Image (tube, rainbow, N blue to C red):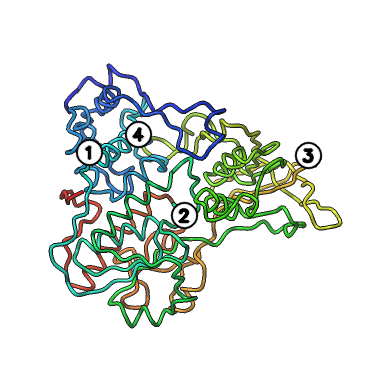
Amino acid sequence: MGKPTGFLEFKREIEQYDAVENRVSNYKEFTIPMEEKALKNQGARCMDCGIPFCHSGCPLGNLIPDFNDNVYKGKWKEAAKILHSTNNFPEFTGRLCPAPCEEACVLGINEDPVTIENIEKNIVETAFKEGWIVAQPPTSRTGKSVAVVGSGPSGLAAAQQLNRAGHLVTVFERDAKVGGLLRFGIPDFKLEKTIIDRRVAVLEEEGIVFKTNAHVGKNISVETLQEEFDAIVLCGGATQRRGIPIKGADLKGVHQAMDFLKQNNQRVDGITQFDEILTAKNKNVIVIGGGDTGSDCIGTSNRHGAKSVTNFEILSKPTIGRPANQPWPYWPMRLRTSSSHKEGVERFFSISTKEFLGDNDGNLTGLITTEVEWIFKNGERPQLIELPNTEKHWDCDLVLLALGFTGPETTLVDQFGLKTDFRTNIDASTKNYMTNVPGIFAAGDIRRGQSLIVWAISEGRQAAHHVDVYLMGKSNLPLKDDNDLPRI
């Protein structure tokens, strides 16, 4: 590395946030960019560690020490080439990824890890600012056509890779705009939608065709796709939302988190007005579910002007440090406090909702909870028990269910005649990503279940390689461990 002693000289720094009172008044991103000198210092912290465990921590296999070294040396264009060699969309992961690479950083064994995610974001933003990211369509076409169903991160990655191989790629998106949950799931204060638009514009210039309001299985038949395309890649995500089967779950005021978030994104986009969407304004809001989706609901509720925001998590409160049974370099289930949490919320752990309460008109008025405890025994599934005499009544006007997803919707599964695994995900071999129907492939959450954006991009890239092999008999598209450096 260019600065062998950098990790001894510089402490970890990350981007700071705009003040809470300023940022909750709008839906803009609120991070304050770091100076170039500070970023170079952070790149200098990357150690000459011999075995970079960050490679294996990253689902994409990003060449992290290589681009960190180039940032330290001020070689931003070279850093951008290296970063894009394994990651099609670092502007997404640099904002939204929980950074498993940082948890696997060797420096993180006994010090604060390298700020890999923030460096990644600044590399790609510099590349866009300097005009280094431009459309580069393939020099020749194969004459083969591929349909990609779904325009989330896995679909976009698969589409770009297949287009680079020279195939004619059409992406079908059922919503009005491209991006999947990046567009209509992730709040704008975490990802402004202009970030998606500028990348999609590059993909269109490269020759990819996007068809919106195109719901395969509804207004576009699966037979049409099979007749018109040589291969199909299903990247529709795992969008079946998990409910909570208790009394009162059908009351007016109990809603799925993704409905709440999607409607707000549509309003910010100008598709709808505030009085047309589900709102938290002047309401006592309870968010059930302690993951990223729950956090997004908290941040959005505060921006609506909620009277109060409370968050329930059925799991025990994690430790602040790394748990003993999750040693480095594994991903630790530690307590994580997001920027939305810091904007105002009361969090409760080891709590289970027993019943929703309503008035005579079917409107939600409150709920009842009980405290719970998890019992762990060697070799057995953990058991959840309710603690006696812990029932509590909570007043609330709006409940948002952020309980995760159970798998893909069944429309495509049924109409294509696809097999599913024991978790109801599409059964597509990890060897070649192909389903039981020849020529139909699957990638992303629709294949692996609810997961991370970085995994979705990785899946799209891997699937594209195998689709190319299916169509041409061989492929030059890189797999995860292929360290060739394709163009930006």
Which of the labelled discs sits on residue 130, or is there none?
A: 1
Nearer mark to the viewer, of 4 and 1: 1
Q: Residue at x 52, y 44 (%)?
A: 292
Residue assigned mark 3: 390
**Amino acid type, callout 1:** Glu
Q: Residue at x 45, y 37 (%)?
A: 29
Q: Upstream in the sequence, badge 3 or badge 2? A: 2
Question: Gap in Å between the C-alphas at discs 4 and 1?
Answer: 18 Å
Q: Upstream in the sequence, badge 4 or badge 2? A: 4
Question: Gap in Å between the C-alphas at discs 4 and 2?
Answer: 22 Å
Relative to 392, does residue 275 appear above or below in the rendering?
A: below
In percent of width and height, residue 24 lies at 56, 34
**Amino acid type, callout 2:** Leu
Question: Gap in Å between the C-alphas at discs 1 and 2?
Answer: 28 Å
Relative to 316, does residue 473 appear above or below in the rendering?
A: below
Which of the labelled discs sits on residue 181, or is there none?
A: 2
Question: Gap in Å between the C-alphas at discs 3 and 2?
Answer: 38 Å
Residue assigned mark 4: 118
Q: Mark 2: which secondary structure? A: helix
Q: Residue at x 31, y 28 (%)?
A: 107
In the rendered image, the residue lying farthest to the top is: 9
Q: Upstream in the sequence, badge 4 or badge 3? A: 4
Question: Gap in Å between the C-alphas at discs 3 and 1?
Answer: 59 Å
User: Given contact means CB atoms under 8 Å apart, are the residues at marks 3 and 1 in contact?
Assistant: no
Left or right position of 455 against 72: right
User: Given contact means CB atoms under 8 Å apart, are the residues at marks 4 and 1 in contact?
Assistant: no
User: Given contact means CB atoms under 8 Å apart, are the residues at marks 4 and 3 in contact?
Assistant: no
In percent of width and height, residue 237 lies at 45, 61
**Amino acid type, callout 3:** Thr
In percent of width and height, residue 484 lies at 15, 50
Q: Mark 3: which secondary structure? A: loop
Left or right position of 469 against 200: left
